[in-house]
Image: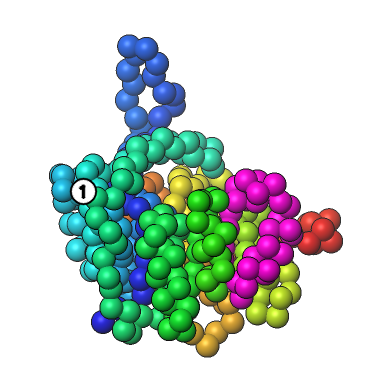
């Protein structure tokens, strides 16, 4: 029976560490690389599965060798995939360097068929990243009517974002989301409140999470301090964060959201120490070990006052 539904766009991520990118007829050899599944909601679904609750995943899949490789990965983690056919698999080429990551995406989102009808019986959470706009709004409305928790990864403003927010309970957006709307972080939180989101937040990397809680109180959850020399690849850490708070909610639905976000914070701190999405997926034991290993960053007085 379905416990959670994630909806997104499948990528195959090729992540590599190189000192430079060749140009012209030049060549170079990467120092390390990883090949894995990718995509925001897709990676979040795998994170939830690795922690112990394999969700259902509605995502794009092509009938090619990369598509079949993706389905093999999903089977390994017992993720139940509901496919929406595209002609070609999408790819991401990711180059992490010095705590940042440059990405080139090759995307086919020309869906060949309508999204499939799914039975939501037993479902307790829906997580979206805005891809598959028609499916996202359909299932957000259906879950809202059924009293199922709805969550949005607002990594950027998409064509359906403003409409979608009206059916979202938990909206965690990025600084890029704020920049695209020309809003300050505080103004972006106010926007989420006016859209009816019960919990809203902005992920700010090493500066933590600015968010408002069940009582509309705005606060900052500092990031865990991972030494620079241990940071390998920050790509996908936000997706792990989303998948982990969904897992935490499913296992402890009566806990306050601050507890769910603390669990997810530790999961994402674990994630940045590994190359590629599959290697970074944490187990519950990994999350618990990370909580003990790293301390939260101190919040400067000036920033606290600004919040």
For residue 119, which quarter of the picture? bottom left
Q: Position of residue 255 (x, y in %)?
A: 55, 84
Judge by depth and name the residue closer to the eye, 188 or 38: 188
Categorize mark 1 by other alpha carbons within 10 Å: few (<14), some (14-19), many (20+). Answer: many
Q: Which residues are magenta?
A: 170-199
Quadrant location, the C terminus: bottom right
**Residue 248 in the figure: left or right of residue 203:** left
Q: Is residue 185 magenta?
A: yes
Residue at the disc numbered 1: 62
- Residue at position x 38%, y 46% in the image: 275
Q: Position of residue 69 (x, y in %)?
A: 18, 50
Q: Position of residue 71 (x, y in %)?
A: 20, 57
**Residue 21 in the figure: left or right of residue 53:** right
**Residue 215 in the figure: left or right of residue 90:** right
- Residue 168 vertical position relative to residue 123 in the rendered view, above or below: above
- Residue at position x 68%, y 58% in the image: 188
Q: Position of residue 65 (x, y in %)?
A: 15, 44
Extreme residue in the bottom direction: 254
Determine the secondary structure under disc 1: strand
Judge by depth and name the residue closer to the eye, 271 or 246: 246
For residue 221, which quarter of the picture? bottom right
């Amino acid at each position: 029976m379905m416990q959670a539904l994630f909806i997104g766009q499948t990528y195959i991520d090729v992540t590599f560490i190189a000192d430079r990118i060749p140009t012209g007829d030049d060549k170079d050899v990467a120092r390390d690389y990883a090949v894995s599944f990718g995509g925001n909601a897709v990676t979040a679904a795998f994170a939830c599965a690795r922690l112990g609750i394999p969700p259902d995943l509605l995502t794009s899949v092509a009938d090619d060798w990369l598509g079949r490789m993706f389905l093999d990965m999903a089977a390994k983690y017992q993720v139940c995939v509901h496919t929406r056919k595209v002609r070609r698999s999408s790819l991401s080429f990711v180059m992490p360097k010095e705590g940042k990551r440059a990405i080139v995406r090759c995307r086919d989102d020309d869906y060949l068929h309508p999204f499939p009808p799914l039975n939501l019986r037993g479902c307790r959470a829906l997580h979206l990243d805005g891809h598959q706009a028609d499916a996202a709004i359909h299932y957000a409305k259906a879950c809202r009517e059924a009293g199922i928790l709805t969550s949005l990864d607002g990594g950027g403003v998409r064509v359906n974002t403003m409409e979608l927010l009206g059916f979202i309970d938990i909206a965690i957006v990025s600084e890029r989301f704020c920049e695209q709307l020309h809003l300050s972080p505080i103004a972006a939180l106010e926007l989420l409140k006016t859209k009816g989101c019960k919990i809203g937040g902005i992920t700010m990397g090493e500066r933590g999470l600015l968010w408002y809680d069940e009582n509309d109180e705005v606060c900052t959850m500092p990031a865990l301090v991972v030494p620079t020399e241990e940071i390998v690849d920050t790509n996908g850490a936000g997706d792990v964060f989303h998948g982990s708070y969904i897992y935490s909610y499913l296992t402890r639905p009566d806990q306050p959201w601050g507890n769910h976000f603390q669990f997810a914070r530790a999961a994402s701190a674990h994630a940045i120490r590994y190359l590629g999405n599959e290697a970074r997926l944490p187990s519950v034991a990994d999350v618990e070990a990370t909580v003990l290993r790293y301390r939260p960053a101190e919040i400067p007085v000036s920033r606290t006052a600004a919040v």
